[in-house]
Image (cartoon, grey):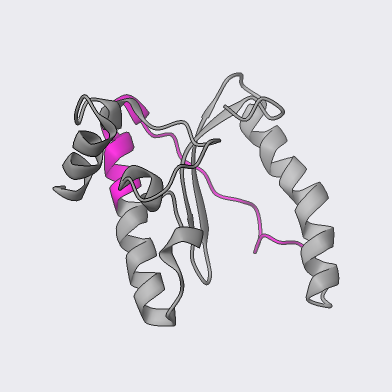
């Protein structure tokens, strides 16, 4: 988990126009607190770096509830495919766009909390990465 925010981050996707997070909150205010912290810390940095003003979000952030125990792998796979597409289209490094390198066994993201379904893909990291590639 990300203890400061009381959320477990299972996956993420950064594309040219969107930002996806697959999070499990530890309490009912954890996600709103996490998003609020991003707005307070990252937005001033981003605006200063790019000489702009205003909100990071184009309106309010959008969220939905996902049953991570049953559909978490589907969401991570969706983010993987979208990251691959973005990387190919804009000639970007996939390692910086999503949690896919972690799930594929190419790198370790220490602050990522893999979904339970991923652990069920095999007994070893190699088996899990191979199982993830087969989806």
Residue 107 location in percent, x, y? 42, 48
Picture quadrant of residue 73: top left
- Nearer to me, 43 or 112: 112
**91 sits to left or right of 57:** left
Picture quadrant of residue 44: bottom right
Q: Residue furthest bottom?
A: 90
Viewer can see residue 53: no
Residue 47 location in percent, x, y? 81, 68
Q: Who's the residue at 71% across and 61% down the image?
A: 56
Picture quadrant of residue 91: bottom left
For the N terminus, the quadrant is: top right
Q: Is residue 10 magenta?
A: no
Q: Who's the residue at 20% across and 31% down the image?
A: 121
Image height of 18 relative to 3, above or below:
below
In magenta, the rendered stretch is 55-77
- Nearer to me, 57 or 43: 43
- Nearer to me, 64 or 20: 20
- Nearer to me, 104 or 41: 104
User: What is the tally of numbered marks visible in this picture?
Assistant: 0
Q: Who's the residue at 65% across and 64% down the image?
A: 58
**36 sits to left or right of 8:** right
Q: Residue furthest top?
A: 27
Residue 8 location in percent, x, y? 53, 29
Q: Is residue 71 magenta?
A: yes
Image height of 115 relative to 46, above or below:
above
Viewer can see residue 3: yes
Residue 108 location in percent, x, y? 45, 42
Q: Who's the residue at 33% across and 66% down the image?
A: 84
């Amino acid at each position: 988990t990300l203890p400061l925010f009381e959320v477990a981050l299972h996956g993420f996707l950064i594309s040219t126009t969107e930002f996806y997070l697959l999070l499990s909150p530890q309490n009912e205010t954890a996600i709103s607190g996490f998003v609020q912290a991003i707005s307070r810390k990252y937005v001033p940095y981003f605006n200063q770096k790019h000489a702009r003003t205003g909100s990071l979000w184009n309106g309010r952030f959008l969220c939905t509830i996902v049953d991570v125990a049953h559909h978490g792998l589907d969401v991570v796979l969706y983010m993987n495919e979208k990251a691959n597409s973005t990387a190919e289209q804009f000639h970007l490094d996939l390692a910086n766009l999503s949690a896919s390198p972690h799930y594929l066994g190419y790198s370790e993201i220490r602050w990522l909390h893999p979904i339970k379904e991923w652990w069920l893909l095999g007994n070893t990291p190699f088996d899990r990465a191979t199982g993830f590639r087969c989806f």
